[in-house]
Image: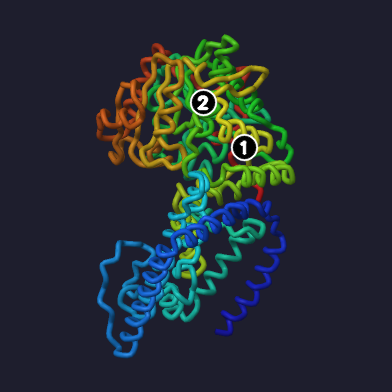
Amino acid sequence: MTANLAKVEDLSQRLIAALSRRNPPNAVLSGPGQDLFAKAAASYWSEAVENPAKLYEHQVSYWSSSVRSFMEAQRLMLTGETAAADDKPADKRFANPLWSTHPYFRYIREQYELNAKAVQDAVAEADDLSPVEQKRLSYFARQIVDMMAPTNFLGTNPDALERAVETEGESLVKGLENLVADLEANDGEMVVRLADESAFELGGNIATTPGKVVFRNDMMELIQYAPATDEVHEIPLVIFPPWINKFYILDLKTQNSLIKWITEQGYTLFVVSWVNPDASHADIGLEQYIEDGYLTAVREAKAITGAKKVNVVGYCIAGTTLALTLALMKKRGDKSVKSATFFTALTDFDNQGEFTPFLQDDFVNGIEAEIDAQGILRSFILGRTMSFLRSNDLIYTPAIRSYMLGEAPPAFDLLYWNGDGANLPGRMTRQYLRGLCQRNEFAGEGFELFGETLRLADLDVPFMAVTCETDHIAPWKDCFRGMAKTASKDRTFIVSQSGHIAGIVNPPSKKKYGHYTNGDWSGGADDWMAAADFNEGSWWPRWEEWLRSRSGPKVAARTPGDSDHPPLADAPGEYVRRRASR
């Protein structure tokens, strides 16, 4: 006990020191404008005045349920009986049997569920709100409900209390150590570590496919991977990963590395590794990503291989920007791209989906104030936003395990990558949010870049679009709607099972997720899926067959670089190692 108290005293000092370094984001980014809640309250009271019977009915139902729950808990406590297990729908937060059988915990859980339902019902009946306001109110109400779950508090979490008793308080000390370590690692921001960072080394046990950095500028490193076959296709492949996270999601480990698999199929592969921006990149816009990233990578890949054309891949935001690049190349008469592949890429933002709460003016204004002050959108802000879309899985459950149960985070490569975020340049962030997300200019009247008006309808190269069935970041139906607006006569659309990452990182050897195919673009997304064929297994071999027919004859395998492009570093390069600022 004495030793533990000494640890707590030391940890308390470290906690204060860590919090003193905090550089908080703009306060507007912590919640919606007050006008949303004012409108919701006005709608609620207007309904109460116009239809008081409905309000009374809801209140009486809520009161009676609460009182019955209290009386049953009191009866069980007085008699010493164990409550019978109930048939409530499964909620993994309440997996501990005590939530059903112990009178105290059962009462706490039932009251939480009653209050959660009351909030949800009130939100659903706010009739005077627009669809966007209704969606935002529902989202933020859910966040409040999730935050107030009894599992998030020590005194009402049986798992944490049992662990504290079993370990004589050691679990709570370890939890405090984990909390302080997270605060110290993130300059006072509470960002829960999802993975054991000490378990991974870039180039050691992740991102290990051999290759060389053959070109570097202020925007990116271009990695050429070593051949894995004696011969390769004449036309090289260039992959543009998103710059929100690092490229090695495609090269986590040998068993699921798309990069390694591509080289084994006989392709000369180049992958862009984007720079992690800092305040000096504040004025970097989409123009620099396109000119110094996309167009430069294509030019250098052609120069190194001697090929006249390349095939290209764009993933997520890099797929969106690839579409912009192809529209620009069309305007310029540049025919360097033989074919394009889009991984989960949105090009039509008419439906903002789950990001609707964050793409309205109050939040975007707050982001603009943040980037005006910092020069960048710091990675933890974007990471926090993404995590709150799945707050129970990505925030509260990991926090409970780490801070209440005192458990070390797991050695999980995907979660390690997820935490290795990148900052976004201020100007590029503003262009993306205002011009693409809010005004949807690329799919509409046109997006202005380089003195040109770029339109989605300008895109006419052969392409394949790979989307994911349960993707909440780039919903497949929205991807379909955008790709249907292109001018390409040679287009293929695939829907992979699973989500934004697992649906793409889906090696054939796993035999886990299948995919849907349909060559008919005549109807909408629902029509496409209704007539689609389901195919067992990964889409990778189907894509490779499609790519092979557009990659030319075989030539002798190429080693990375040439006399004009001497290797600058081993893969995965230097830019990928730069950690994001907080």
> What separation in Å lies between label 2 and label 1 (alpha carbons)?
15 Å
Give the labeled residue for mark 2.
270
Q: How many marks?
A: 2
Q: Which amino acid type corresponds to the residue marked 2 in the rendered image?
A: Phe
Up-down relation of residue 321 to residue 504 (above or below): above
Q: Which of 87 and 329 lies nearest the eye of the viewer?
A: 87
Up-down relation of residue 329 to residue 28 (above or below): above
Question: Could you tell me residue 412's position as x and y percent?
Answer: 44, 52
- Left or right: where 280 falls relative to 227: right
Q: Which amino acid type corresponds to the residue marked 1 in the rendered image?
A: Tyr
Specify the quadrant that holds the N terminus.
bottom right
Under circle 1, the secondary element is helix
Q: Tell me the residue at 48%/22% (across/down).
A: 312
Question: Could you tell me residue 51's position as x and y percent?
Answer: 44, 60
Q: Which of 135 and 240 lies nearest the eye of the viewer?
A: 135
Label 2 or label 1, whichever comes before in sequence order:
2
Q: Is residue 416 visible?
A: no
Question: Dot 2, how many residues are within 10 Å of its Cα: few (below 14), some (14-19), or many (20+)?
Answer: many
Q: Tell me the residue at 35%/73% (across/down).
A: 65
Give the labeled residue for mark 1.
575
Occupied quadrant, residue 109? bottom left
Q: Is residue 389 visible?
A: yes
Question: Could you tell me residue 458's position as x and y percent?
Answer: 52, 16
Under circle 2, the secondary element is strand
- Left or right: where 177 falls relative to 493: right
Q: Are marks 2 and 1 in contact (CB under 8 Å)?
A: no
Image color mode: rainbow
